Image (cartoon, rainbow, N blue to C red):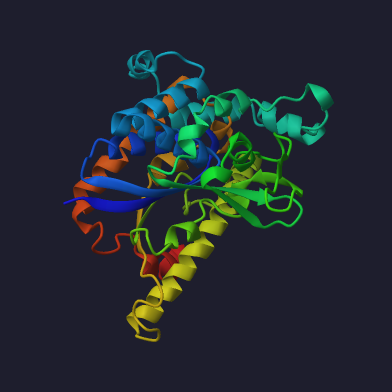
Amino acid sequence: MVKRINLALQGGGAHGAFTWGVLDRLLQDEDIEIAAISGTSAGALNAAALKAGMVQGGRTGGRAALDTLWHKVGAVHDLRLTGWIAQALPPVGVLNTWAERFMPVSAADAASLVASPYALGPFYRNPLQKIVEGLAFDRVCAGEGPALHIAATNVRSGKIKVFSGIDIGPEAILASAALPTLFQAVEIADPATGETHAYWDGGYTGNPALFPLFAADLPDDILVVSINPLYRADVPTTPQEIQNRVNEISFNSSLLRELRAIRFVKRLIEEDRVTRGAMKGVLLHMIADDVLMNSLSVTSKLTPTPYLLHTLKEAGRAACDSFLAQHKDDLNMRDTLDLGAMFEEGQQS
């Protein structure tokens, strides 16, 4: 029996390779049909590559397009060599700790403290531009395949902007991934008014945005691929740890707000306080590897080494495989993400 689901893909720089692995494994299961995707930042890149590949070549095309995307991000031709070398290297968490000890402040962080991305003037080039422009936007915006939604943050209003369908061009993807300390705001004209708006990374307002997936014609199930740990047991004490946790909290806040709203609506439905069918009863699921992500930090988000990308991809595949083994039969039937436990019980409330 085919299980129709929607995907919600978080942003998180190089850690988006974890989502690459999840999608790679998901596409191998022919019982899973992806109806719609909402993506932010790295999640937007994954979403666009996935759709373009699927429109061209189905599931195989989707996997190939994701491989091409992340090979470009890692600036390598073949990650299989990295997999072989990885057997002789320590875990990525250990390497991340070493890197932070030898370089307490990353080069990118140091530069952001003394220079603006506008300092280069006419010489500025977005380093993601070539990769993004390599996506086939005739297929990204095609009417066939999964519906696609990309989130960015309006710099002036601070509000979320969701680009959908034919409004998704290279600028929308670049805007969704435009961290303000590293990239200039991306300016996009509103086709309805002609007014130009400036946009930053969508992670501040929708990481990812869930509400576009509430449409009546879409399935009830939303599978969130989380790459920013919701919970850390230890209180951060070093400058690097503090910065990292602030980054995670900031980029999880919008998702948590939407999850709380879904929980509120679900309770109204369960208590018959609204007419059944008047509001959508969303079924939520999540794939994550908080053990791995807790061993990493904001530093590794900005350093897409082939070894890191390979490790994250394999972790994503393993996490998806575990999810499907445990919960595939639950899809289209019931929640597997316990919102009650997330918001109302113990230390994670």
The relative height of residue 120 versus residue 297 in the rendered view (above or below) is above
Give percent across and percent down for residue 222. 37, 56
- Write the residue at 54% across / 32% down: 300
Quarter residue 119 falls in: top right
In this rendering, does residue 71 appear at all?
A: yes
- Write the residue at 31% across / 41% down: 319
- The answer to which of 82 and 200 lies nearer the viewer is 200
In this rendering, does residue 18 appear at all?
A: no
Left or right: 205, with 187 as reference point? left
Left or right: 127, with 131 as reference point? right
Give percent across and percent down for residue 84. 33, 15
- The answer to which of 51 and 329 lies nearer the viewer is 51
Residue at the far bottom: name it: 273
The relative height of residue 300 versus residue 176 in the rendered view (above or below) is above
Give percent across and percent down for residue 216. 39, 64
The relative height of residue 93 versus residue 244 in the rendered view (above or below) is above
- Write the residue at 62% across / 27% down: 129
Left or right: 157, with 288 as reference point? right
- The answer to which of 145 and 183 lies nearer the viewer is 145
Residue at the far left: name it: 1
The relative height of residue 245 versus residue 100 in the rendered view (above or below) is below
- Write the residue at 35% across / 85% down: 272
Quarter residue 23 falls in: top left
Give percent across and percent down for residue 203. 58, 48
